[in-house]
Each structure stands twice: as structure tokens, then as C-alpha cells.
Amino acid sequence: MEEFHLGMDDIDSPRGGCTTHFASLLAEDLTNLGVTWLDYPNLIRLNPNIPYRTRGNGAVVLRFRAPPDVGNTVLENVEQAIEKYVEHDYPNTNPGVVLVRGRPPSEMSKLSTLAEWRVLAIDVVRRFLSRHHIAHISRGNGRGIVGATAAVGNRLLDDCTFEFIAYRSLEDTAHERGVDAESVYEMNRRMKGKTFSNIDPQTGSVLIQPHGPDPVIYGIRGDSPSDLVEAASLVRCHQTIERWTIFRTNQGTGEHLRHLVRISDLRPYMAAVVRGRVERRGIMTEGGHLIFTISDDAGTIDCAVYEPTGEFREVAASLIPGDIVEVHAGVRPASRTHGMTLNVEGLNVVALVENVILSNPLCPQCGKRMKSAGREKGFKCTKCGYRDASLEKVREVVPRHIHPRLYLPPPRAQRHLTRPYERLGVRNVLENTVPTLAWLSSHGKT
Ligand SMILES: [Zn+2]
């Protein structure tokens, strides 16, 4: 038996199929061929700021042991399966598949880390694959091999979560999923602390079901596979669940935001934490976006908090010059209308200054707010005529409505990788990645 790591990315079909769905079908085939699973299928999210990753599609890795004869034909079989799944000449997909035999080279985990917060160039990946004689399939513009390679290198050692994904058939993708919202609310109540990002608390919208025409009916996220099986049993939907799969993932781990970057070192599309001092208060644009400015010892940059983040904008709007913040951000490149900008996806308020307002004193005789009597002439009262050259402006401390802590946009506006409030301080480390329960709907069936 030999060890294999099969990474794949950007496998979409004209009927809305996606990489995780394709991987589920493939996992079923491999199970039937008698492979031994080393891990749950890994669903790896990469740098969410990369512009050509249009659908937020995650890359998937299947890790298993197989007899050499199975191993020798894996890539050929995958290639045929892709042809069938993608159908001929479907232009919107650039499938990439990578097959590592034996343990993945350590250099691969470095590529993986890079792909999480920077732009991993396709040429770098191609050179790496050829240097290590790693077999791969690359179609379309070949971008898929970047995600496939980066995903194989991520062993999810520091932290991980799981997602239970229920699928419908590709024939059903044109119709309503019919996920029963009441059943999701009930599941959310019963599985509190064991699942996350089921519902948006402000809008009440159900977040477990996507809206596109893809085969995913719903996905439930949490820290333990058995909790997710229980959670899924509580959710009702009209459409038939054709299959389900439990993935081990980096979703909800925040692992794209592990780099503290100085403003002068920021580059387009980076995912970075930027520590700075608020220079200018937030200004609301016509589109409802809030823009404020921070600086560090090396530069100054605008930070944008977008309209869809709703009430999260109020946190940014409460910042005043002098406050120290750590901005969790994606770097948007400069354009004709604006300089390089931080797209804010989290705000860690580190320190707040006192919000002091200087105002004119109240009249000691009648209590009315006084007017300035001219430069260095103190104040005068317009009501009773009282004047006093010795009076000075009064210092007033206005209470702040935010506190030193981490603020996140509401769940509906979070990234797949965002570490949600429910997981702050949580580290889910697996001693052994070999699955201990059925993670594929066809398991246990004959
Ligand atoms: Zn007065």
C-alpha cells in the first residue's frame, strides 16, 4: 500500500457542479476501489482576495493509501471523470489536479502558506511540480493547479473545523432547495456551541444554504463530525439529498490573517493584519461605504468598510484620531479613483483615546452657554450680559461606545476563513486524522 495525496481545484460543470461535489463522487469511486482513508476529504480555502477566484470555490484534497495498481491509474480515472463532469469545452472552469505519491515535500507547505495570504504565481507552482516530478492535470488557463497544489500542502495541523455538505442531484439544481428555515432555527438552538454560522442574528437569514444553482443543498459547520451528523438530522428540506460528505477544513480558522504587515510592505491582494493609529474619522460615501484612514511609522492608508457589512460600519464610524487598531484586511490595489485600500474584514480595537470636546462655559449667573468675547478676552453672556475675561473653555469627556476587543462583520458578510466569535480562542487539533465515523453517505451501504 502506497500513500497518495490527490489535490483538485476549479472543477465546475455547466449544470452548476463544483469541486466539493466532484470530490464527493470521486471519494465514493475510490472507496469502491478499496483505498484506505488517511483523513477526511480536506476542503481548503485560499486567499479570498485573489480576483480570479470568482466563486469562492475551495480546493479539495483526498488523502489515502492504495495498492500500486490503483495508484497507477488514479490520475487517468480522474481525468476521465473530469471530462464527463465538466462536459466539452465548458469555458468557465480551469480544472487542476495534482497527485503526490508518498509524503508531500515540505516545500509544499510553504507554497500552501503563501497561497493563503499572498498571490501564488502559476509559474512558481509549475516549476515546483516539475522539480519534484509530481503528476498533474491542468486544463483551461491552468489556474486550478495553483489551488490544488496549495491545498495538498495544508495538513490542517494548527486548527481545523468540519463541514457537513448535503448534495442534490445535478438534475435538481435548477429548482428551489426548500430548506425549512424553522428547522434550521431549531437546529441552531439545539446545537449551540457545537456549530457556527448557521443564521445571521440581525437579519434572521439562513446561512447554511447557498443561493446559486449548484448541487449543494446546505452545509453545516462545526468542530466535530459527530455533532454535524446530529445537526444535519435536524434540518428538513424539500429536495432529495442524493449524497452527503463531511469535509475537514480551514474554514473559520482565520489562518489567512496571521501576518502583521507594515503599511509600506502591503501589496495588492494580500490578506494582512495592519496595526495603525486612526488619522481621520470615517466618512460615509454615497454607496453607504465607510472610509477611514490609519497610519503607522511607515505610511498612511484608507480603510473601507463596505455597505453589506451593515452595523459593523458603526464600529468603524466610532473610531477617532489617536485610536490604535489592528485592521484585518484584504488589500485592494490602487485604481484611478483611489489609492491602495484596505478592505476591512475585522477590527481589533487595541487602545482608545479619550474623546475630549472643548466647549464654551455656562454662564455662572443665568446658566446659558456663553459666547467668546474675543481673543484672550474670555466669555460673555448674550442673555444677561455677564462678562468674565478669566473664564476658559470647558473640557468635556464624551463616553466611547466601543471597547478594546475584536469586532467582526455579521456572519452574513464574513469570509469562509473568518474566525467567528464562537471560535475565538478555540484550537481544534487532531491527534489522528483517520476518520472514526462514516463521513460519506455511501459508507455502510452495499
Ligand atoms: Zn447669563
Image: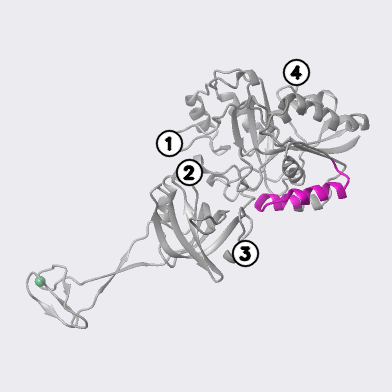
**Are there few (<14), some (14-19), or many (20+) residues within 10 Å of tag 2?**
many
**Mark 3 / mark 2, whichever is N-terminal:** 3
**Residue bearing the label numbered 1:** 203
**Mark 1 / mark 2, whichever is N-terminal:** 1
**Mark 4 / mark 1, whichever is N-terminal:** 1
Q: Which mark is residue 139?
A: none
**Residue bearing the label numbered 2:** 410
**Are there few (<14), some (14-19), or many (20+) residues within 10 Å of tag 1?**
few
Q: Which residues are the magenta region?
A: 111-135
Front one among 81 and 428: 81
Q: Amino acid at mark 1?
A: Thr
Q: Which mark is residue 265?
A: 3
Q: Determine whether, in the image, residue 288 is placed left or right of residue 380.
A: right
The quarter holding residue 151 reads top right
What residue lies at 78% left-to-right and 48% top-to-bottom? 125
**Residue bearing the label numbered 4:** 445
What residue lies at 44% left-to-right and 56% top-to-bottom? 291
Q: CA distance from mark 1 to mark 2?
A: 9 Å
Which secondary structure lies at badge 4?
loop
Front one among 64 and 313: 313
Q: Nearer the viewer, mark 3 or mark 2?
A: 3
